[in-house]
Image (tube, rainbow, N blue to C red):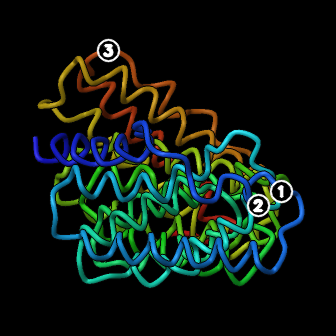
Amino acid sequence: MRSISRLLWIAALAATVFATPARAADKLDSIMKKSDLSNADKALVDQEVQDRASRLASVADESPDEREKVRGRLLETLSISGATDAALNYYADRCAYHLAGLVLSTSRPAGEDAAMILRSVNRPAVAPALVSGLRSPFESVQYHCAAGIKSLRSAIGDDRSLVSSALTALGDIGATTRSEALLQVVYEATDFCGAIQNFAVADLQAKALTKILRARMADLRVGSQDELKDAAGYQAALSAAKTKLTIESKRDLLAVLVDMLEAHARRYGDRETSKDYLPTLRRLVGELERAIQELLRSESTNPPGRTLSGVVKDRPNSSQAKDALRAIDDLRQVIKQEPWNIG
Protein backbone atom coordinates (compact mmCIF):
# COMPACT_ATOMS: atom_id res chain seq x y z
CA MET A 1 0.00 0.00 0.00
CA ARG A 2 2.87 2.32 0.88
CA SER A 3 4.51 1.90 -2.55
CA ILE A 4 1.21 2.63 -4.30
CA SER A 5 0.76 5.80 -2.26
CA ARG A 6 4.29 6.89 -3.06
CA LEU A 7 3.74 6.27 -6.77
CA LEU A 8 0.55 8.35 -6.75
CA TRP A 9 2.35 11.09 -4.86
CA ILE A 10 5.18 11.25 -7.39
CA ALA A 11 2.74 11.13 -10.28
CA ALA A 12 0.85 14.05 -8.78
CA LEU A 13 4.07 16.01 -8.52
CA ALA A 14 4.98 15.23 -12.11
CA ALA A 15 1.55 16.26 -13.34
CA THR A 16 2.05 19.79 -12.04
CA VAL A 17 5.14 20.21 -14.21
CA PHE A 18 3.07 20.51 -17.35
CA ALA A 19 0.39 22.83 -16.01
CA THR A 20 0.16 25.92 -18.22
CA PRO A 21 -2.33 28.38 -16.73
CA ALA A 22 -3.05 31.56 -18.67
CA ARG A 23 -0.47 34.26 -17.94
CA ALA A 24 0.59 37.71 -19.05
CA ALA A 25 2.94 37.98 -22.01
CA ASP A 26 6.40 36.62 -21.25
CA LYS A 27 9.09 39.31 -20.89
CA LEU A 28 11.38 37.20 -23.06
CA ASP A 29 8.88 36.67 -25.88
CA SER A 30 10.65 38.72 -28.54
CA ILE A 31 14.15 37.53 -27.58
CA MET A 32 13.15 33.87 -27.70
CA LYS A 33 12.15 34.27 -31.36
CA LYS A 34 15.62 35.40 -32.42
CA SER A 35 18.01 33.04 -34.16
CA ASP A 36 21.03 35.07 -33.08
CA LEU A 37 21.04 36.49 -29.56
CA SER A 38 23.12 39.59 -28.91
CA ASN A 39 25.11 40.04 -25.73
CA ALA A 40 22.39 42.36 -24.49
CA ASP A 41 19.74 39.73 -25.22
CA LYS A 42 21.73 37.11 -23.33
CA ALA A 43 22.15 39.44 -20.39
CA LEU A 44 18.39 39.98 -20.22
CA VAL A 45 17.69 36.24 -20.40
CA ASP A 46 20.26 35.53 -17.72
CA GLN A 47 18.87 38.16 -15.38
CA GLU A 48 15.28 37.03 -15.89
CA VAL A 49 16.14 33.37 -15.21
CA GLN A 50 18.14 34.38 -12.14
CA ASP A 51 15.20 36.41 -10.80
CA ARG A 52 12.77 33.56 -11.41
CA ALA A 53 15.10 31.03 -9.79
CA SER A 54 15.49 33.29 -6.75
CA ARG A 55 11.73 33.55 -6.51
CA LEU A 56 11.47 29.77 -6.75
CA ALA A 57 13.80 29.36 -3.77
CA SER A 58 11.86 31.92 -1.75
CA VAL A 59 8.48 30.14 -2.07
CA ALA A 60 9.70 26.68 -1.03
CA ASP A 61 7.73 26.89 2.23
CA GLU A 62 4.59 28.35 0.69
CA SER A 63 1.49 26.59 -0.65
CA PRO A 64 1.61 24.08 -3.50
CA ASP A 65 -0.41 26.49 -5.63
CA GLU A 66 2.11 29.28 -5.11
CA ARG A 67 5.00 26.98 -5.91
CA GLU A 68 3.25 25.82 -9.07
CA LYS A 69 2.72 29.43 -10.13
CA VAL A 70 6.41 30.22 -9.75
CA ARG A 71 7.44 27.04 -11.57
CA GLY A 72 5.14 28.12 -14.37
CA ARG A 73 7.04 31.38 -14.74
CA LEU A 74 10.19 29.43 -15.57
CA LEU A 75 8.47 26.88 -17.79
CA GLU A 76 6.21 29.17 -19.81
CA THR A 77 9.16 30.53 -21.80
CA LEU A 78 9.76 27.06 -23.23
CA SER A 79 6.36 27.12 -24.95
CA ILE A 80 6.64 30.51 -26.63
CA SER A 81 5.36 30.12 -30.18
CA GLY A 82 8.17 30.63 -32.66
CA ALA A 83 10.98 30.20 -30.13
CA THR A 84 14.21 29.25 -31.90
CA ASP A 85 16.58 26.44 -30.99
CA ALA A 86 19.34 28.94 -30.34
CA ALA A 87 17.22 30.85 -27.85
CA LEU A 88 15.84 27.73 -26.19
CA ASN A 89 19.32 26.28 -25.82
CA TYR A 90 20.57 29.45 -24.18
CA TYR A 91 17.54 29.57 -21.89
CA ALA A 92 18.18 25.93 -20.93
CA ASP A 93 21.82 26.76 -20.21
CA ARG A 94 20.79 29.57 -17.86
CA CYS A 95 18.21 27.37 -16.13
CA ALA A 96 20.88 24.76 -15.54
CA TYR A 97 23.27 27.37 -14.17
CA HIS A 98 20.82 29.03 -11.79
CA LEU A 99 19.03 25.86 -10.64
CA ALA A 100 22.05 23.56 -10.23
CA GLY A 101 22.51 24.56 -6.60
CA LEU A 102 18.82 24.58 -5.79
CA VAL A 103 18.28 20.99 -6.97
CA LEU A 104 20.62 19.89 -4.17
CA SER A 105 18.89 22.04 -1.57
CA THR A 106 18.35 20.70 1.93
CA SER A 107 14.76 21.85 1.45
CA ARG A 108 12.79 19.06 -0.18
CA PRO A 109 10.19 21.37 -1.83
CA ALA A 110 12.92 23.59 -3.28
CA GLY A 111 14.81 20.59 -4.62
CA GLU A 112 11.64 19.12 -6.11
CA ASP A 113 10.71 22.36 -7.85
CA ALA A 114 14.17 22.73 -9.36
CA ALA A 115 14.29 19.09 -10.46
CA MET A 116 10.85 19.26 -12.08
CA ILE A 117 11.85 22.33 -14.06
CA LEU A 118 15.16 20.86 -15.20
CA ARG A 119 13.37 17.67 -16.23
CA SER A 120 10.82 19.65 -18.25
CA VAL A 121 13.44 21.77 -20.03
CA ASN A 122 14.61 18.52 -21.66
CA ARG A 123 17.63 19.97 -23.47
CA PRO A 124 21.25 18.79 -23.29
CA ALA A 125 22.37 21.87 -21.36
CA VAL A 126 20.53 20.72 -18.24
CA ALA A 127 22.02 17.23 -18.23
CA PRO A 128 24.90 17.98 -15.81
CA ALA A 129 22.51 19.56 -13.32
CA LEU A 130 20.20 16.54 -13.51
CA VAL A 131 23.12 14.18 -12.94
CA SER A 132 24.24 16.27 -9.99
CA GLY A 133 20.68 16.24 -8.64
CA LEU A 134 20.79 12.44 -8.34
CA ARG A 135 22.86 13.07 -5.21
CA SER A 136 19.94 14.82 -3.52
CA PRO A 137 18.96 13.26 -0.18
CA PHE A 138 15.32 13.25 -1.28
CA GLU A 139 13.84 10.43 -3.38
CA SER A 140 11.29 12.70 -5.01
CA VAL A 141 14.14 14.86 -6.35
CA GLN A 142 16.07 11.77 -7.45
CA TYR A 143 12.96 10.56 -9.28
CA HIS A 144 12.60 13.70 -11.40
CA CYS A 145 16.34 13.84 -12.12
CA ALA A 146 16.38 10.20 -13.20
CA ALA A 147 13.34 10.77 -15.41
CA GLY A 148 15.10 13.76 -16.99
CA ILE A 149 18.23 11.71 -17.58
CA LYS A 150 16.17 8.96 -19.20
CA SER A 151 14.95 11.50 -21.78
CA LEU A 152 18.45 12.85 -22.40
CA ARG A 153 20.44 9.61 -22.58
CA SER A 154 21.46 10.15 -26.20
CA ALA A 155 22.91 13.57 -25.38
CA ILE A 156 24.54 12.48 -22.12
CA GLY A 157 26.11 9.46 -23.77
CA ASP A 158 28.44 11.69 -25.78
CA ASP A 159 30.19 12.81 -22.59
CA ARG A 160 32.09 9.89 -21.05
CA SER A 161 32.71 11.67 -17.73
CA LEU A 162 29.07 12.72 -17.39
CA VAL A 163 27.67 9.30 -18.28
CA SER A 164 30.05 7.72 -15.78
CA SER A 165 28.79 10.03 -13.04
CA ALA A 166 25.19 9.36 -14.04
CA LEU A 167 25.49 5.57 -14.05
CA THR A 168 27.44 5.52 -10.79
CA ALA A 169 24.78 7.59 -9.06
CA LEU A 170 21.93 5.59 -10.61
CA GLY A 171 23.55 2.38 -9.41
CA ASP A 172 23.84 3.76 -5.89
CA ILE A 173 20.20 4.90 -5.83
CA GLY A 174 18.85 1.67 -7.28
CA ALA A 175 20.77 -0.39 -4.75
CA THR A 176 19.33 1.48 -1.76
CA THR A 177 15.83 2.67 -2.62
CA ARG A 178 12.70 0.91 -1.42
CA SER A 179 10.46 2.91 -3.75
CA GLU A 180 9.08 0.90 -6.65
CA ALA A 181 8.45 4.03 -8.73
CA LEU A 182 11.98 5.30 -8.22
CA LEU A 183 13.56 1.91 -8.89
CA GLN A 184 11.70 1.59 -12.19
CA VAL A 185 12.77 4.99 -13.50
CA VAL A 186 16.34 4.31 -12.34
CA TYR A 187 16.41 1.06 -14.31
CA GLU A 188 15.05 2.90 -17.37
CA ALA A 189 17.51 5.78 -17.01
CA THR A 190 20.36 3.28 -16.66
CA ASP A 191 19.57 1.72 -20.04
CA PHE A 192 21.87 3.83 -22.21
CA CYS A 193 22.49 0.79 -24.41
CA GLY A 194 18.80 0.75 -25.27
CA ALA A 195 18.88 4.40 -26.35
CA ILE A 196 22.27 4.63 -28.07
CA GLN A 197 23.37 2.26 -30.80
CA ASN A 198 26.85 0.84 -30.13
CA PHE A 199 27.06 2.61 -26.78
CA ALA A 200 30.76 3.04 -26.17
CA VAL A 201 30.88 2.48 -22.42
CA ALA A 202 28.38 -0.34 -21.98
CA ASP A 203 30.51 -1.78 -19.17
CA LEU A 204 29.43 1.15 -17.01
CA GLN A 205 25.79 0.21 -17.56
CA ALA A 206 26.52 -3.43 -16.74
CA LYS A 207 28.31 -2.40 -13.55
CA ALA A 208 25.43 -0.20 -12.38
CA LEU A 209 22.87 -2.92 -13.14
CA THR A 210 24.93 -5.57 -11.37
CA LYS A 211 25.07 -3.42 -8.25
CA ILE A 212 21.31 -2.82 -8.26
CA LEU A 213 20.43 -6.44 -8.97
CA ARG A 214 22.71 -7.71 -6.20
CA ALA A 215 20.93 -5.47 -3.73
CA ARG A 216 17.55 -6.63 -5.03
CA MET A 217 18.72 -10.23 -4.75
CA ALA A 218 19.41 -9.64 -1.07
CA ASP A 219 15.79 -8.50 -0.67
CA LEU A 220 14.48 -11.57 -2.46
CA ARG A 221 16.54 -13.87 -0.27
CA VAL A 222 14.75 -12.57 2.82
CA GLY A 223 11.36 -13.16 1.21
CA SER A 224 10.39 -9.78 -0.28
CA GLN A 225 8.43 -11.47 -3.14
CA ASP A 226 8.35 -8.27 -5.19
CA GLU A 227 10.12 -9.54 -8.28
CA LEU A 228 7.93 -7.48 -10.58
CA LYS A 229 9.99 -4.44 -9.57
CA ASP A 230 12.85 -5.72 -11.69
CA ALA A 231 11.19 -6.10 -15.10
CA ALA A 232 12.77 -2.86 -16.39
CA GLY A 233 16.10 -4.07 -15.05
CA TYR A 234 15.90 -7.26 -17.10
CA GLN A 235 15.28 -5.18 -20.22
CA ALA A 236 18.30 -3.00 -19.43
CA ALA A 237 20.37 -6.14 -18.87
CA LEU A 238 19.31 -7.48 -22.27
CA SER A 239 20.27 -4.20 -23.92
CA ALA A 240 23.70 -4.34 -22.27
CA ALA A 241 24.14 -8.00 -23.23
CA LYS A 242 23.71 -7.10 -26.90
CA THR A 243 26.66 -4.71 -26.82
CA LYS A 244 30.41 -5.12 -26.46
CA LEU A 245 31.16 -5.90 -22.82
CA THR A 246 34.36 -7.13 -21.24
CA ILE A 247 34.30 -10.72 -20.04
CA GLU A 248 34.52 -9.43 -16.46
CA SER A 249 31.37 -7.34 -16.90
CA LYS A 250 29.59 -10.21 -18.59
CA ARG A 251 30.57 -12.62 -15.82
CA ASP A 252 29.42 -10.34 -13.00
CA LEU A 253 26.12 -9.55 -14.68
CA LEU A 254 25.47 -13.16 -15.64
CA ALA A 255 26.11 -14.39 -12.10
CA VAL A 256 23.49 -12.12 -10.55
CA LEU A 257 20.98 -12.76 -13.35
CA VAL A 258 21.22 -16.51 -12.73
CA ASP A 259 20.70 -15.89 -9.01
CA MET A 260 17.59 -13.88 -9.87
CA LEU A 261 16.35 -16.68 -12.11
CA GLU A 262 16.77 -19.16 -9.28
CA ALA A 263 14.70 -16.89 -7.04
CA HIS A 264 11.92 -17.07 -9.64
CA ALA A 265 12.23 -20.87 -9.75
CA ARG A 266 11.81 -21.09 -5.99
CA ARG A 267 8.87 -18.71 -6.11
CA TYR A 268 7.28 -20.99 -8.70
CA GLY A 269 7.61 -24.00 -6.41
CA ASP A 270 6.35 -22.14 -3.33
CA ARG A 271 2.91 -23.44 -2.31
CA GLU A 272 1.97 -19.92 -1.21
CA THR A 273 2.42 -18.51 -4.72
CA SER A 274 -0.94 -17.44 -6.11
CA LYS A 275 -2.11 -19.02 -9.34
CA ASP A 276 -3.02 -15.51 -10.51
CA TYR A 277 0.66 -14.53 -10.28
CA LEU A 278 1.87 -17.27 -12.64
CA PRO A 279 1.30 -15.35 -15.93
CA THR A 280 3.41 -12.50 -14.53
CA LEU A 281 6.03 -14.98 -13.36
CA ARG A 282 6.20 -16.56 -16.82
CA ARG A 283 6.71 -13.16 -18.42
CA LEU A 284 9.46 -12.19 -15.98
CA VAL A 285 11.22 -15.52 -16.42
CA GLY A 286 11.10 -15.16 -20.20
CA GLU A 287 12.59 -11.64 -20.10
CA LEU A 288 15.30 -12.72 -17.70
CA GLU A 289 16.24 -15.81 -19.70
CA ARG A 290 16.57 -13.74 -22.87
CA ALA A 291 19.22 -11.60 -21.19
CA ILE A 292 21.01 -14.68 -19.82
CA GLN A 293 20.99 -16.45 -23.17
CA GLU A 294 22.26 -13.34 -24.96
CA LEU A 295 25.23 -13.20 -22.59
CA LEU A 296 25.97 -16.89 -23.01
CA ARG A 297 25.86 -16.77 -26.79
CA SER A 298 28.10 -13.68 -26.87
CA GLU A 299 30.92 -16.02 -25.80
CA SER A 300 29.80 -18.91 -28.01
CA THR A 301 28.24 -20.79 -25.09
CA ASN A 302 25.11 -22.79 -25.83
CA PRO A 303 22.33 -22.34 -23.25
CA PRO A 304 21.01 -25.57 -21.73
CA GLY A 305 18.13 -27.26 -23.52
CA ARG A 306 15.92 -27.23 -20.43
CA THR A 307 14.80 -23.72 -19.51
CA LEU A 308 12.75 -22.37 -16.66
CA SER A 309 10.33 -20.71 -19.07
CA GLY A 310 9.71 -24.16 -20.56
CA VAL A 311 8.84 -25.52 -17.13
CA VAL A 312 6.66 -22.76 -15.68
CA LYS A 313 3.08 -23.77 -16.48
CA ASP A 314 0.04 -23.58 -14.27
CA ARG A 315 0.17 -24.20 -10.53
CA PRO A 316 3.06 -26.62 -10.13
CA ASN A 317 2.89 -30.09 -8.68
CA SER A 318 5.92 -31.48 -6.86
CA SER A 319 7.37 -32.84 -10.11
CA GLN A 320 7.17 -29.46 -11.88
CA ALA A 321 8.69 -27.70 -8.88
CA LYS A 322 11.65 -30.10 -9.05
CA ASP A 323 11.96 -29.57 -12.81
CA ALA A 324 12.18 -25.83 -12.21
CA LEU A 325 15.17 -26.31 -9.91
CA ARG A 326 16.71 -28.81 -12.33
CA ALA A 327 16.57 -26.13 -15.03
CA ILE A 328 18.59 -23.87 -12.74
CA ASP A 329 21.02 -26.70 -12.01
CA ASP A 330 21.49 -27.24 -15.76
CA LEU A 331 22.27 -23.57 -16.19
CA ARG A 332 24.71 -23.54 -13.29
CA GLN A 333 26.56 -26.47 -14.80
CA VAL A 334 26.99 -24.47 -18.00
CA ILE A 335 28.33 -21.35 -16.29
CA LYS A 336 30.85 -23.35 -14.26
CA GLN A 337 32.73 -23.95 -17.49
CA GLU A 338 35.09 -21.66 -19.41
CA PRO A 339 34.96 -18.76 -20.00
CA TRP A 340 32.52 -18.11 -17.16
CA ASN A 341 33.93 -20.01 -14.19
CA ILE A 342 30.93 -19.08 -12.04
CA GLY A 343 30.25 -21.48 -9.26
Q: Residues within 10 Å of mark 1 (few under 14, many from 20)?
A: some
Foreground residue among 236 and 326: 236
Identify the residue at horizontal 61%, vertical 43% (top origin).
79
- Secondary structure found at label 1: loop
- Give the mark nearer the N terminus: 3 vs 1: 1
- Give the mark nearer the N terminus: 3 vs 2: 2
The image position of residue 19, as x and y in percent, is 40, 39
Q: Is residue 123 at all visible to an observer of this figure?
A: yes
Judging by the rendered image, the residue that carries numbered circle 2 is 87
Q: Quadrant of residue 235?
A: top right
- At label 3, the amino acid type is Asp
- Give the mark nearer the N terminus: 1 vs 2: 1
Identify the residue at horizontal 68%, vertical 59% (top origin).
123
Residue found at the far right of this picture: 36
Q: Is residue 295 at all visible to an observer of this figure?
A: no
Q: Quadrant of residue 264?
A: top left
Foreground residue among 235 and 189: 189
- At label 2, the amino acid type is Ala
Identify the residue at horizontal 69%, vertical 80% (top origin).
43
The image position of residue 341, as x and y in percent, is 62, 71
- Tags 1 and 2 touching, CB below 8 Å: yes
- Tags 3 and 1 touching, CB below 8 Å: no
Judging by the rendered image, the residue that carries numbered circle 3 is 314
CA separation, marks 3 and 1?
64 Å
Q: Is residue 57 above or below residue 250?
A: below
Residue 317 circle label: none
Residue 34 circle label: 1
CA separation, marks 1 and 2?
7 Å
Screen quadrant of the N terminus:
top left
The image position of residue 4, as x and y in percent, is 19, 40
Which mark lies nearer to you, 1 or 2? 1
